[in-house]
């Protein structure tokens, strides 16, 4: 398999040890970033050891956000990091779970494809894993390096088949693949020193699976002394230049690639894989981080949602808000407001003190809905910038129908099947039923934007494409009534006759979108709606200070 540079395609496998939450996803994305900055074409892939076929059915409290790709794959949230740091293609080929792998092997077994053989983890499951590695590397032309992150921690029973597949793969492609192992080097306060033992043990565990790391990334609080690095190098059988410290960042996760470059990671990888020894120019990225760190401007945005105890449940939304801030040279402080804890309007007013914008993100089920409706009403009546995403758009519509259209029972049939006014409903329940059933609308859909709208002022484009993940839709039966009272439909998927963007006419910035713009935002390419929302919040902030 040749890459765009005419060399054999290269693979980097990233495993993790000691404990979870060390930032393996961000480390993988940062490595990809550094290689891209050298002019290489990189693909990223996540292997997840759990048995769910995809995270789509998992509770956000368990798993965090479900990241959606253009081709409609419901994937792990690490793909969001990959997107924000790199230009890696992201598709169904970029994420595989044990569940998916077993499902495929069992499907073939039922079909009789194995011709009576005993179907086993080795070779059948491992072959399927290896097939997917190659598929990811070939998903678009010219990929030079494929970076594969293995979820979980070395030693987990579930990840064994993945490690075995990698061992086999590496056995066959020794010169063209490396393993980087991420561990934790804790500082023990009372002893006044850092400890390498957990790293040594975790590497031993990895070696038991037949994998010998080429590099060790040591997550630590402060830079490691040469002496400590030498110890890790000796005991873990890795050259000294392969021991890289990954220190805790002070300001932003976007600093990680800079830290890794400084620590020499890029050169070590290039040497091991025979990649061009060109130092990456990171000046544009550096400048972006400087803006983020140095700016004195602040704005506080309230996120009113239901999965806020889990810090990763709205990961892409939080990041996209920060990106909107970067483009406005503003730091965005996020105030999380649990929608089911909002007692009444006074309580809400108190909770919103100091906030210059309200964002209601996506969600499922009826818990916390009335708090979100209260927030939408408060934003509409007080001219506070409001951004409704997916469920947040549906909430904005329900609130408007109840209060302005005088339909007090208006609701989504997701929450109330008996509602007299199903202004949000499944297509099959709506009057002009089409044959699109009641299943989830997933992945990218085109949308035409009204050139006279606020949304257009953000996008500066009439034809856009955005990603969806929802079942319910705005019911066109109510379209005329909404529009005549000032809730405008300004974005539509023409072919499906579905409403995608709505905004309130006589409001400085109240926009609801049925899709998930947060999935497409990047620090250097902030999503136009997030950029516009933060600009509107800044304006609101300035004006309310003046009054
Ligand atoms: N629960 C709503 C629906 O299914 C919204 C989903 C979402 O916010 N992602 O339509």
Image (tube, grey):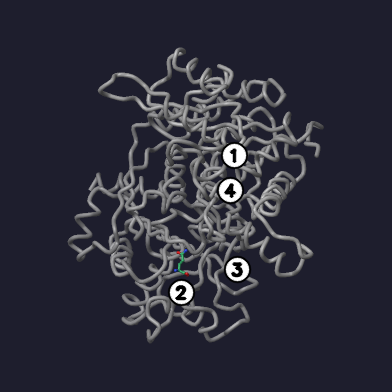
User: Residue 78, percent across and down?
Assistant: 52, 46
* Sequence order check, earlier mark of 3 and 1: 1
Find disc 2 in the rendering and name its residue.
Answer: 483
Disc 1 residue crowd, few under 14, some 14–19, many 20+, Cα 10 Å: many
Image: 324 above or below 246: below
Q: Secondary structure at mark 4?
A: strand
* Sequence order check, earlier mark of 4 and 1: 4
Figure quadrant of residue 408: bottom left
Find disc 1 in the rendering and name its residue.
Answer: 86
Figure quadrant of residue 102: bottom right
Find disc 3 in the rendering and name its residue.
Answer: 493
Image quadrant where one finds the N terminus: top right
Estimate the spatial distance between the alpha carbons at disc 4 and disc 3, rounded to whole Å: 34 Å
- Residue ID at (56%, 43%): 150
Estimate the spatial distance between the alpha carbons at disc 4 and disc 2, rounded to whole Å: 47 Å
Picture disc at residue 109: none
Q: Nearer the viewer, residue 26 or 329?
A: 26
Confirm whether residue 511 shows in the render: no
* Sequence order check, earlier mark of 1 and 2: 1
Find disc 4 in the rendering and name its residue.
Answer: 47
Disc 4 residue crowd, few under 14, some 14–19, many 20+, Cα 10 Å: many
Confirm whether residue 348 shows in the render: yes
């Amino acid at each position: 398999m040749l890459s765009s540079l005419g060399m054999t395609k290269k693979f980097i496998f990233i495993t993790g040890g000691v404990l979870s939450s060390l930032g393996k996803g961000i480390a993988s994305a940062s490595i990809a970033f550094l290689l891209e900055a050298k002019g290489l074409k990189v693909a990223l892939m996540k292997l997840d050891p759990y048995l769910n076929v995809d995270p789509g059915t998992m509770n956000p409290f368990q798993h965090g956000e479900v990241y959606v790709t253009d081709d409609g794959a419901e994937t792990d949230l690490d793909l969001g990091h990959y997107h924000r740091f790199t230009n890696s293609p992201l598709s169904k080929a970029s994420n595989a779970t044990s569940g998916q792998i077993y499902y495929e092997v069992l499907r073939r077994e039922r079909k009789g494809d194995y011709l009576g053989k005993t179907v086993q983890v080795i070779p059948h499951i491992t072959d399927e894993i290896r097939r997917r590695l190659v598929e990811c590397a070939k998903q678009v032309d010219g990929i030079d390096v494929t970076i594969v992150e293995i979820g979980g921690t070395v030693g987990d029973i579930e990840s064994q088949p993945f490690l075995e597949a990698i061992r086999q793969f590496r056995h066959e492609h020794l010169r063209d693949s490396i393993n980087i192992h991420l561990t934790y080097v804790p500082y023990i306060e009372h002893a006044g020193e850092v400890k390498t033992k957990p790293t040594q043990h975790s590497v031993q565990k990895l070696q038991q699976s037949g994998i010998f790391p080429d590099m060790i990334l040591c997550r630590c609080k402060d830079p490691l002394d040469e002496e400590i690095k030498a110890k890790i190098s000796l005991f873990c059988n890795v050259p000294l230049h392969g021991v890289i410290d990954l220190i805790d960042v002070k300001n932003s996760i976007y600093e990680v690639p800079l830290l890794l470059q400084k620590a020499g990671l890029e050169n070590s990888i290039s040497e091991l894989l025979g990649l061009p020894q060109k130092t990456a120019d990171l000046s544009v990225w550096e400048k972006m981080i400087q803006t983020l760190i140095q700016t004195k401007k602040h704005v506080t945005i309230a996120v009113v949602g239901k999965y806020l105890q889990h810090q990763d449940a709205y990961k892409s939304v939080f990041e996209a808000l920060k990106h909107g801030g970067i483009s406005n040279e503003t730091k965005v402080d996020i105030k999380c407001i649990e929608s089911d804890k909002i007692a009444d309007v006074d309580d809400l007013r108190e909770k919103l003190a100091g906030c210059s914008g309200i964002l209601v993100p996506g969600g499922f089920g009826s818990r916390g809905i009335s708090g979100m409706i209260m927030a939408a009403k408060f934003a509409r009546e007080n001219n506070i910038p409001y951004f409704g995403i997916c469920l947040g758009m549906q909430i904005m519509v329900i609130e408007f129908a109840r209060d302005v259209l005088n339909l007090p029972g208006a609701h989504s049939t997701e929450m109330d099947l008996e509602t007299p006014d199903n202004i949000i409903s499944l297509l099959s329940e709506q009057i002009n039923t089409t044959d699109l059933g009641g299943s989830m609308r997933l992945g990218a859909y085109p949308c035409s934007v009204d050139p006279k709208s606020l949304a257009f002022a953000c996008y500066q484009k009439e034809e856009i494409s955005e990603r969806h993940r929802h079942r319910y839709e705005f019911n066109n039966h109510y379209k005329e009534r909404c529009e005549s009272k000032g809730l405008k439909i300004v974005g539509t998927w023409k072919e499906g006759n579905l409403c995608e963007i709505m905004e309130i006419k006589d409001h400085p910035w109240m926009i609801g979108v049925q899709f998930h713009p947060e999935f497409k935002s990047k620090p250097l390419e902030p999503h136009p709606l997030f950029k516009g929302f933060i600009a509107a919040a800044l304006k609101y902030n300035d004006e309310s200070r003046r009054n």
